[in-house]
Amino acid sequence: MTAVKAYFLRLIFCGFLVSLTGAILRGKRSARALTLCGGCLLILTAVRPLLRVDLSRLPDLVTGLTHSERIAAAQEKNNAILRGLVEEQTASWIEAKGEEQGMALKAVVTAKEAEPGVFVPDQVTIEGSWTAEGQSALSELIVRELEIPPGRQRWVGG
């Protein structure tokens, strides 16, 4: 509360100072110049605390989030999009490789975050029909290209 009191005291003091100097001067031109200078001094005194405000810490008027909260929300959204892209494109790649070998497959991939903002395929579930040789060949390709070991490959169907 002392900061608010000090603020009001500064405004009152500036107003008193402008009024006192206006009473001392008699000329019309000097009174106008003094009114201009006094008004500028009052404005600067009134606005000075606003210059100290850290605008990045204020909440957004639309979302109600601070700058750091907006950045965190954007990063979270970007990570979800990246994870989804990695999972979708990896599943499409596996299905295409299976189709090349004459298998009808549906792949579902789960990605993990290897480091901040970098997602890699971690697990895969493959449904469909295949031969033992085809499964073995595709499984080896998945291990070699995607580094998903057989323990994290789930084959449903046959």
Image (spheres, rainbow, N blue to C red):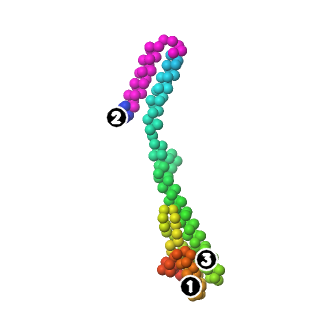
Identified by mark 1, the residue type is Ser
Q: Which residue is mark 1?
A: 136
From this viewpoint, which residue is outermost toward the bottom? 132
From this viewpoint, which residue is outermost toward the top? 26
The x and y percentages for residue 31 are 50, 16
Left or right placement of residue 2 versus residue 45 in this view: left
Label 1 secondary element = helix
Q: Which residue is mark 2?
A: 2
Above or below, 156 relative to 14: below
Left or right placement of residue 152 versus residue 131 in this view: left
The x and y percentages for residue 143 are 53, 78
Residue, x 49% and y 19% (percent of image)?
34
The x and y percentages for residue 9 are 38, 28
Residue, x 55% and y 81% (percent of image)?
140
Q: 69 or 90, which is in the foreground?
A: 90
Dots 1, 3 in contact, CB < 8 A: no
From this viewpoint, which residue is outermost toward the front? 144
Q: Which residue is mark 3?
A: 95
Q: Earlier in the sequence, mark 1 or mark 2?
A: 2
Label 3 secondary element = helix
Residue, x 52% and y 67% (percent of image)?
119
Q: CA distance from mark 3 to mark 2?
A: 70 Å
Dots 1, 2 in contact, CB < 8 A: no
Is 20 magenta? The answer is yes
Number of residues whose C-alpha sits closer than 10 Å to that of mark 1, classed few (under 14), some (14–19) or many (20 or more): few
